[in-house]
Image (cartoon, rainbow, N blue to C red):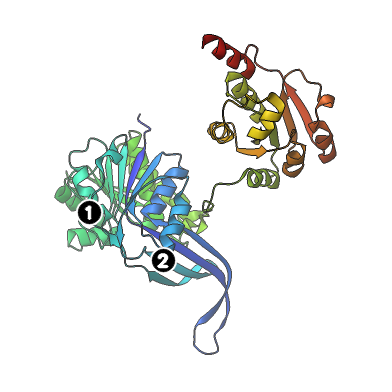
Amino acid sequence: MTRGPIVVIGDVLLDIDIDGDADRIAPDAPVPVVVESGRHQRPGGAGLAALLAAADGADVTLVTAIGDDPAGDVLRKLLAGRVRLAALPLRGRTASKTRIRAKGQTLVRVDDGDGRAGPGRIPPDVLRDAAVVLVSDYGRGVADLARPLLHGLEIPVVWDPHPNGGAPPYGCALVTPNAAEARLLCDAAETPGEAAVRLARSCHADAVAVTLGDDGATVARGTGEHVRVPASEVAAGRDSCGAGDRFAVAAALALRDGATPEEAVAVAVREAGRFVAAGGAAAIRVKAAPDHPRTPREAAEAVRASGGRLIATGGCFDLLHAGHVSLLRRARALGDALIVCVNSDRSVRRLKGPGRPVVREADRVAVLNALGCVDGVVVFDEDDPSALIDGLRPHAWVKGGDYAAADLPESEVMRRIGGEVVILPTLPGHSTTGLITAARAIA
């Protein structure tokens, strides 16, 4: 079983839901008046597929075209930290779809944005470590750029077609049209099973699954056999927006994990049914990444607001060594976030003498920020961090060594804010002074 990364290739758009109640008709036209109660944004198209794959625990790379415009900026923020984004140029404006809904029912959809993938090519190295590829074709050009990369690929390729897109390329592991798309691709009014067989033969696909909504799906191979996979969960009347993306993602991940096409389709039918029953794409809530990295004070406020335990520690951290790292890791294990308070260069000189610090302030901060156990670093210029602690208000202040808590100048402020002082033993044989002395002896 290879549980490697999935690469999603396709057109992304911005989905916007405006929810509200419609209890009256407008006096100036025979239309319902929607009183807005909420507005939600999320990635759509290939962006939704990538988001769903990430929610399933997959390592996801999304290859798409996004414009340098307001909708594109929102999409980048919604995807940041969830998927790796390989962005291609877009000619025109990023597409968006705004649905106005009342009591869960869509009343009207407003589409905007004429963007198509610009000239260029997808770099082949995006597929270097991929275990499966999902092409979410929404007819805006990205899927066409993917075709040259897929020829002879030795990993499963799932192609989710669109009426505005082209025919799937030869050799896909699975093609996943809905019934209407299958008829268009076959140019014939056939049964879903017959359409699946014909499409599997024409595209030389391992299998084709025609999705049928609440009726499940029909999966067929080019040999002529086709099997109906009934839906285990029927959600008649529910919003099915995004169900096709959920189906394609579930099938792709199942193929990645070694399932046969028939087994993958059974998994996909089940997951798509659950998705629709849970409210479909409209139930997805995605919080955009902030415009800037959180400051240590913002991180502290977020931890307290969520009911978490904030830990803080402080020191010079000159010539960071294994003893420092051990202390920081143990401190972080005491709570939900660790803020490190660092003496400024001037403060270190007052405490340690004119030859210190060896490492300047900006570099010490950069090294501390690079540690996974550190959630934020803040510099103070005073001889002790009491004023800084008063602003951060940690639940615990950690020091390393053989101090008595009562002897620390920080103890008074910690007592006043209702926190505790924790003394952790240091790692024997590790000290900055020792390192400096040893380095001078060698020199």
Viewed as shown, does residue 59 lie left or right of 426?
Answer: left
Instruction: Please report the residue visible at 63 percent of the width from the left and 43 percent of the height from the top.
Output: 296
Q: Is residue 431 visible?
A: no
Tag count in the figure?
Answer: 2
Residue 165 in which image quadrant? bottom left
Q: Which residue is more in the foreground, 151 or 344?
A: 344
Percent coordinates x, y for residue 423 in the rendering: 75, 23
Instruction: Please report the residue visible at 60 percent of the width from the left and 13 percent of the height from the top.
Output: 437
Question: Which residue is under mark 2?
Answer: 97
Image vertical order of residue 436 relative to residue 68, above or below: above
Name the amino acid type tagged 2. Answer: Lys
Say few, some or many: other residues with alpha carbon within 10 Å of mark 1 (under 14 / 14 to 19 / 20 or more): many
Percent coordinates x, y for residue 254 in the rendering: 36, 39
Q: CA gap, disc 2 to disc 1?
A: 22 Å
Percent coordinates x, y for residue 38 in the rendering: 57, 66
Q: Secondary structure at mark 1?
A: helix
Image vertical order of residue 388 relative to residue 247, above or below: above
Instruction: Please report the residue visible at 17 percent of the width from the left and 62 percent of the height from the top.
Output: 187
Question: Which residue is under mark 1?
Answer: 144
Name the amino acid type tagged 1. Answer: Asp
